[in-house]
């Protein structure tokens, strides 16, 4: 990928926290389902612990490599993991949207 436009970088940094909040809100609902499900308390507890451990690796929870040079890759991961959709990329340049669409 070439250089990232300043406008794309600013938009990514502005939108990422909101995308992550929305995704984590969805996760909390799923966690509540695990906790209120059937089975012993210990089974539900350990199922939730395993789920949280896996979810913490998702860019919808944390982006480990927040650099301009990795922005396209991180956006692709957000789309792939269902954190955002292509519609959420409204306002980004054709460089970004085209790259992501080619990966689909």
Image (tube, rainbow, N blue to C red):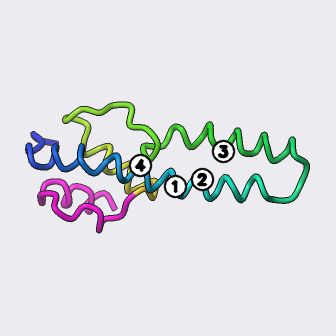
First along the sequence among labels 4 and 1: 4
Q: Are marks 2 and 1 in contact (CB under 8 Å)?
A: yes
Q: Secondary structure at mark 3?
A: helix
Residue on which disc 4 sits: 20
Q: Which is the main secondary structure of the residues drawn in magenta? A: helix
**Residue 94 on the magenta segment:** yes
Q: CA distance from mark 2 to mark 1?
A: 5 Å
Q: Residue at x 24, y 32 (%)?
A: 67
Is 51 positioned to the left or the right of 21 in the image? right
| Quadrant of the frame with the C terminus | bottom left
Q: Which residue is mark 2?
A: 28
Disc 3 designates what residue?
51
**Which residue is located at x 48 percent, y 43 percent?**
58
For the residues labelled 4 and 3, the Cα–Cα distance comes to: 17 Å
The quarter of the picture where residue 93 lies is bottom left
Q: Secondary structure at mark 1?
A: helix
Q: Quadrant of the N terminus?
A: top left
**Could you say which is closer to the camera, residue 18 or residue 98?**
18
Q: Which mark is residue 25?
A: 1
- Tell me whether the residue at label 4 lies in contact with that at label 1, contact meaning CB atoms closer than 8 angstroms: no
Q: CA distance from mark 2 to mark 3?
A: 11 Å
**For discs 2 and 3, the disc positioned in front in the rendered view:** 2
């Amino acid at each position: 990928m070439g250089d990232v436009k300043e406008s794309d970088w600013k938009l990514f940094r502005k939108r990422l926290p909101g995308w992550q909040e929305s995704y984590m809100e969805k996760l909390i609902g799923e966690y509540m389902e695990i906790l209120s499900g059937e089975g012993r308390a210990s089974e539900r507890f350990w199922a939730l612990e395993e789920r949280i451990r896996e979810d913490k690796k998702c860019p919808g929870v944390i982006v480990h490599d927040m650099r301009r040079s990795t922005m396209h890759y991180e956006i692709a991961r957000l789309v792939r993991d269902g954190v955002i959709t292509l519609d959420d990329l409204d306002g980004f340049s054709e460089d970004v949207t085209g790259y992501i669409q080619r990966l689909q």
